[in-house]
Amino acid sequence: MADSGTSASADSLSKLRIRRDQPVSRPSVFMRLLRWLLWFVIPVLLVGGVFVLGTQRGWIPDADRLMEAVRAKPEVRTATVSLETGRSADATVVATGYLESRQQARIGSRATGRIEAVLVEEGSQVSANDVLAILEHADLDASLAAAEASAARCRSELQEQDVEIQRALRDFQRAEKSLAAKTMTAAEFDTEKFEHDAAIARRLSLEAALQLAEARVQEAKQLRENMFVRAPFAGTVISRDAELGESIMPGGMGEASGRGSVVTLADLEHLEVDCDVKEDFISRVIQGQTAEVAVDAVPGRRYRGTVRKIIPMGDRARATVKVRVALEDADARLFPEMSCTVYFLSDEVKESAESEVARVFCPNDAIQQAGSESYVWIVAAEDRLRRVVVQLGEKKEDRTEVTLGLQGGEKVVVSAPQDFRDGMAVRTAQ
């Protein structure tokens, strides 16, 4: 039995032996190529196809957009293409600016304290010396009451001293008669005289004490008055800068140091435009010159203006001079910080008749030439450039009429470089 088991094991081991004489089967070249295609080429083609399809459909950005995402967008300055009617189309100079109040101030207190009440809201109309806010002042009320009591005591002491002077005067007069009748010695007469003189001197001292007490009353009243924030001029509250319970102090800059003002007050009945005129054209602007003002927030309306002041200081970086134009017919639709355009009129234009024909004007420094072709770069949707060919008409000092290609209101790039292209992403300078 043992021999048979050993024989069976030997047979099994012989079957497991590797036969070196038999050839090993290998895949053919075609099968290897087919396997290589399945594992490498087809996935690459699938990925490439998805990428191309995604790029065409917009799922995946193309190479140019990927480069734009990595590359910093160039910053550009823009100007607005204007649509002008009437005498504004023949203005000698055009400038942009912002409305501001001739009188505008942030109103704060003259003392440090905590706000007890704010009596106005945004839009409230106030007159000069109206109370805008009140600071807590219970301690100052007590100080004022003490000062007034001290002054009252000084007045009563002064009245008491007047009675004492009358008594001393009577005694002194009787002493003079007694000395003349030789019924009083000289020493006794001197005593009466000195008491009278001392009573008069003490009255002078009490008068000075009363003046000091009354001065302290005035000081206490002024300290209490400083707790009332009053309007320095008539106007409209355009901003409420502090609330009930907040601390306020002169020169405060915020929560850390206390509020610096309670409200911002502006005189909206006297508005003016603060605009910048290029140095090249400032000679055409004179004080008192007539102008028309177009406010972006009030389309279709032109306001009358007059050049009030030319600031005698230029801006070296921007090559401009600041000019202030006062509005003569401002209405309730105008507020400070609104953007507007000022059209400076010559005497000939001012006297000409109004025209209803709308004309499109583009700034000269936004127009470029390519041979005989004129074009501009427009900042379109998603802050991308679009090249627009234009036909030009009459040329003014700083702008040119566009007869074809623009409709007005477009944002055009000023002084655009030559390497710009259609669809290029940019960012607008603030």
Image (cartoon, grey):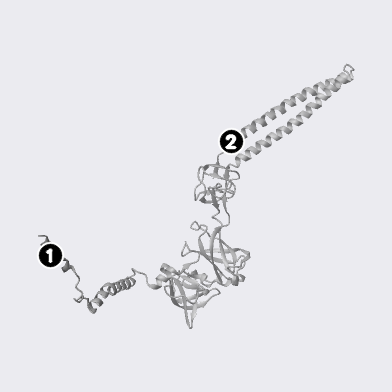
Report the residue at 12% width, 64% height from top: 7
* Disc sitting over residue 306 in the figure: none
Quadrant into which the N terminus falls: bottom left
Q: Residues within 10 Å of mark 1 (few under 14, many from 20)?
A: few
Residue 219, x across and y down, in percent: 65, 38
Describe the element under mark 2 as helix, strand or loop.
Answer: helix
> Which tag, 2 or 1, sits closer to the chain's start?
1
Observer-nearest of 81 and 109: 109
Q: Is residue 28 left or right of residue 318?
A: left
Q: Which residue is mark 1?
A: 7
Q: Amino acid at mark 2?
A: Asp
Q: Which residue in the rendered view is the most extreme toward the bottom?
A: 371
Q: Which residue is mark 2?
A: 139
The residue mark sitting in front, 2 or 1, is 1
Report the residue at 48% width, 71% height from top: 413
Describe the element under mark 1 as helix, strand or loop.
Answer: helix
Report the residue at 62% width, 40% height from top: 223
Residue 239, x across and y down, in percent: 51, 51
Give the Cα separation between the discs numbered 2 and 1: 121 Å
Residue 164, x across and y down, in percent: 76, 24
